[in-house]
Image (cartoon, grey):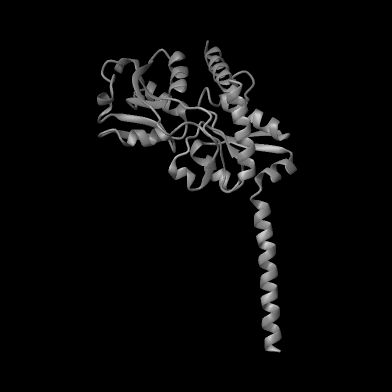
Amino acid sequence: MKKVTKVMLLIIIAVVGLVLSGCNQKDVNELEVIKKRGKLIVGTSPDYPPYEFIDVETGEVIGFDIEIAKEIAKDLGVELEIKEMSFNGLLAALTTGNVDIVLAGMTPTPERMESVDFSDIYYTAVQTVIVHADNKDTISSLDGLVGKQVGVQKGTIQAEIAAEIEGAKVKELGKITDLVMELKFKNIDALIVELPVAESYVKNNSDLYLTSITFEEVDGGSAVAVKKNSPELLTEINKTLKRLMDENLIDKFVTEATNKVNADEE
């Protein structure tokens, strides 16, 4: 009787293992899940113009990342849903399944690649520094940042750059808009952001100044984040990105989004 029980137990364990294995294989096919649902859920942090920001007229999230998201959804044959959240919460939302992909001007750093996978780079920007106009002569080079209070968006590549500045006191906040206000009120001395973002804010705030300080990304750039082990979805996303780059549509989206930011503030 004991021998039969052990055999049955082994069979049950084997069957359960096969079932769970099958479920896991099915769960990792994110492309299939999205197509079955008929909707692509994109996570973003809409405080980073021209990448993603709020349209002052409609209240909708727009920007060139959003245009890319629309193209991905179109190529997948599904609807698009945008979920707004703080930048530093995006990857957690992705890994827990609250969103399908993340499009937020995100750089695929080694640390991030431990928890998620990334598409091909679709846009590479130069990192730069903006300061209060009153300080444009005192903070005009990298040496001018030594020992200064430097603002960065929490969880970004800019935070890593600031950490390398000698003696800098780094202030991390979740939203660029909050950091801009900190700079305007001189609670921080400088703010590190990507060039197109810096240009947008400086153009629309006469008390801010764009310095000539730059940090070029060697292996950086922006990419789409997806869950680990989602090869089918990643392949389709990369197909869309290649098409957009081949047709020069990403440059077009960047220009249109930047013009929209500037028009909103005029």
For residue 155, above or below residue 254:
below
Which quadrant holds the N terminus? bottom right
Q: Please report the residue visible at 42 percent of the width from the left and 28 percent of the height from the top.
A: 179
Q: Compared to 45, does 199 lie above or below? A: above
Q: Is residue 45 visible?
A: yes
Give me the residue at 42% from left, 26% from top. 193
| Above or below for 11 versus 174 | below
Residue 212 found in image quarter: top left
Q: Is residue 111 left or right of residue 29?
A: left
Q: Does residue 100 appear in the picture of this structure?
A: no
Give the x, y percent position of residue 49: 51, 23
* Foreground residue among 190 and 10: 10
Residue sitting farthest toward the top:
266
- Residue 196 % position (x, y): 47, 21
Residue 155 image point, x, y percent: 44, 38
User: Looking at the picture, how far across and down is residue 133, in whole percent?
Assistant: 34, 15
- Which residue is rendered at x = 67% and y = 37% of the image? 40
Q: Would residue 9 be found to the left or right of residue 52 on screen?
A: right
Please state the total of marks drawn on the protein image.
0
